[in-house]
Amino acid sequence: MTLNLIISRTLKLLYEKLFPFTAQATILHHINRINTGKVLDVGCGKGENIKFLSNEWHFRGVLIGFDMHMPYLRKAKTLKIYDDVLLADANHLPFRISSFDAVLAFDLIEHLEKKQGLDFIRACEKISKDFVIIFTPVGYLSQEPYDGNPYQQHKSGYIPREFRSLGYKVYGVRGLKFLWEGGAKPKLKLVSELISWMTQLFIYFYPDLAYQMLCIKSLRQLQS
């Protein structure tokens, strides 16, 4: 492990403890309200996003992973985080209304055509009782298939006002957009990472300038 990597990880951990404005902290603020029940992770991939949250997420319910790339599902299953994993297409969520307490979709919706993405949002809201949490780049971010997965291609992009018009609260994450390039790699490595953390507080409230956005809709408030 290089010195730069050690410094980067140490500063990141320190930042996340001191400032509750990261994507992880915001997601945890909402999903930690759900201690039991059922949660669906659509487009779970290899399970890396949930693994990132798992140490701080005190969840004792049923967690289902959902993806259409079998090699990723096999890897997700080895993490032993999910109670079950399903091979299926996000364009056709085979679940009844209000089947889950929360539906998560991290780094997924940009892989769908725009109309499919909007239909997907509505489908998520139908099968969830409490929350829908979507994590996606701000605007269109070009990406071709990689890692032997043809579904990794980006086909659409969204801006904050589109989610706000659908009733979502939107938060900017990962720092200023211009600091990053395709593939989520900082242009200037450690320097860009440091600057992105320093600008996180600002872009949290101004997501149009952010690299990525976290979109959260509380369905329980709408039902009450």
Image: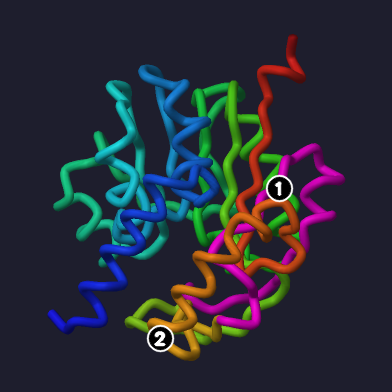
User: Is residue 114 found left or right of 80 in the rendered image?
Assistant: right
Residue appearing at x 28%, y 66% in the figure: 9
The quarter in which the N terminus is drawn is bottom left
What label does residue 73 carry, if any? none
Colour logic: rainbow
Q: Amino acid at mark 1?
A: Val
Q: Amino acid at mark 2?
A: Lys
Q: Is residue 190 above or below residue 122?
A: below
Quarter occupied by residue 7:
bottom left
User: Is residue 167 found left or right of 41 in the rendered image?
Assistant: right
Quarter occupied by residue 55:
top left
Residue 162 percent across, percent down from the top left: 82, 55
* Residues drawn in magenta: 151-179
Q: Is residue 67 above or below residue 57?
A: below
Q: Earlier in the sequence, mark 2 or mark 1?
A: 1
Residue appearing at x 64%, y 75% in the figure: 177
Residue under pointer 2: 189
Residue 3 percent across, percent down from the top left: 19, 82
**Dot 2, crowdedness within 10 Å: few (<14), some or many (≥20)?**
some
Residue found farthest to the bottom? 188
Residue under pointer 1: 170
Q: Is residue 53 above or below residue 97?
A: below
Q: Secondary structure at mark 1?
A: strand
**Dot 1, crowdedness within 10 Å: few (<14), some or many (≥20)?**
many
Q: Secondary structure at mark 2?
A: loop
Residue 50 percent across, percent down from the top left: 34, 47
Residue found farthest to the top? 224
Residue closer to the observer: 26 or 155: 26
User: Cα distance, mark 2 to mark 1?
Assistant: 27 Å
